[in-house]
Image (spheres, helix red, strand yellow):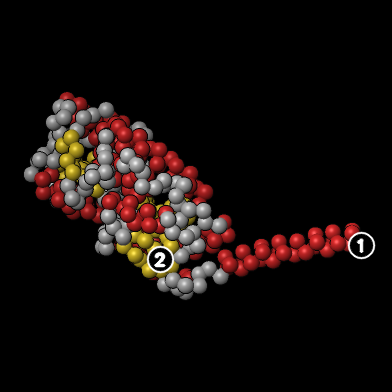
Amino acid sequence: MKHLSVCVATVTAMALSTLMGMGAVHAAENFPNKPVRLVVAFPIAGATDILARHFALKMSEQMGYQVIVDNRPGAGGTIGSKIVSGAIADGYTLTMGTTSTHAIGPHLYTNKPYDPISDFTAITQMCVSPTVLMVAAQVPAKSLKEFIGLAKSQPGKLNFGSSGIGTQFHLSGELLKLLAGINIVHVPYKGTALVYPDMIAGQIQMLFDVPPAALPFIKQGRVRALGISGAKRTPVLPDTPTIAEAGLAGYEADLWWGLFAPPKMAKDRLARVHAIAAKSLTSPEVKERYAGMGTDVVASVPEAFTTFLKVESAKWEKVVRASGAKAE
């Protein structure tokens, strides 16, 4: 009888375990059963917001439930990101993070508002875009090597503009300074659009910006493109080499966007959210819309995205420390 009781208990435990496993699978398969909130930590009509809305529309179609874009701007994206880091990891609260929010921003604070790795579940690197290194038309340098030589001959005399302290465009310039060993002065603005008039007037000598914004000025001959920040050339400027190709080995500073959830999301739910997100990102509609903004879809798996984040965070932490940049 004792042996029979043990057998019954074992069978019962196995049955419960199986049912629990089936319940977890069922829960994953039933996701979602209500709308999903996608927090965007930047203002409406900015690049991140536009990309997020294209993605949210397709993801809503895939799921049959609306993905609601919730703009929570402020403090360089840290406010919206912190909201998500403290939410429940059930897949119904997500955020579209960026290089600024998950590789640069946290390192600008003495007391980090959140850890970009441990305080989130990395779902997928969504897309990537290069930036363009430009100099004013008055600058005599016709190549990156010539510009570096000019900067070395005039330490502290050349200026580079950006959209603000701690932004991707600022830190891209600081990375250039670090790798090239040059001393050029950073001048922060409230947006890159405000830099161009001073560049054309000759007060600013260098600027990083996204291709769609830079292209009109390049075509008009008001600024000169010297290099692309990413690992490959961009189709909109096919004759402009990457900064690494132009002579600064190891330079790479793409803008990227990724999908994140709160920390410690269950594996089955993560797999489900990732599958929906990847299918949405790789749809012809989203790929076409992103390409129109000079952005390439990536749609990586969570493990690859987590590895990428660790490398990016370490790289930009080093640049932030070398530049002395602090959050304002």
Residue matched to label 2: 37
- Please tell me which residue is depicted at 45% across the width and 56% down the height of the picture: 262
- Please tell me which residue is depicted at 36% across the width and 44% down the height of the picture: 112
| Residue 227 sits in quarter | top left
Q: Is residue 258 visible?
A: yes
Mark 1 residue element: loop
Instruction: Kindly give the residue lying farthest to the front in the view shown.
Output: 2
- Please tell me which residue is depicted at 33% across the width and 45% down the height of the picture: 105
Quick one: label 2, few (<14), some, or many (20+) residues within 10 Å? some
Label 2 to label 1: alpha-carbon separation? 56 Å
The amino acid sitting under disc 1 is: Met
Q: Quadrant of the C terminus?
A: top left
Q: Residue 145: horizontal and vertical position, in percent?
A: 24, 31
Give the camera-side residue of 84 and 144: 84
Asked if residue 134 is positioned above or below residue 94 in the image, the reply reads above
Q: Residue 87: horizontal and vertical position, in percent?
A: 44, 59
Q: Residue 44: horizontal and vertical position, in percent?
A: 27, 63
Give the camera-side residue of 308 and 285: 308
Asked if residue 148 is positioned above or below residue 110 in the image, the reply reads above
Answer with mark 2 or mark 1, whichever residue precedes in sequence: 1
Instruction: Judge from the rendering whether residue 47 lies leftward or rightward of residue 5; answer left or right.
Output: left
Residue matched to label 1: 1
Instruction: Kindly give the residue lying farthest to the top in the view shown.
Output: 153
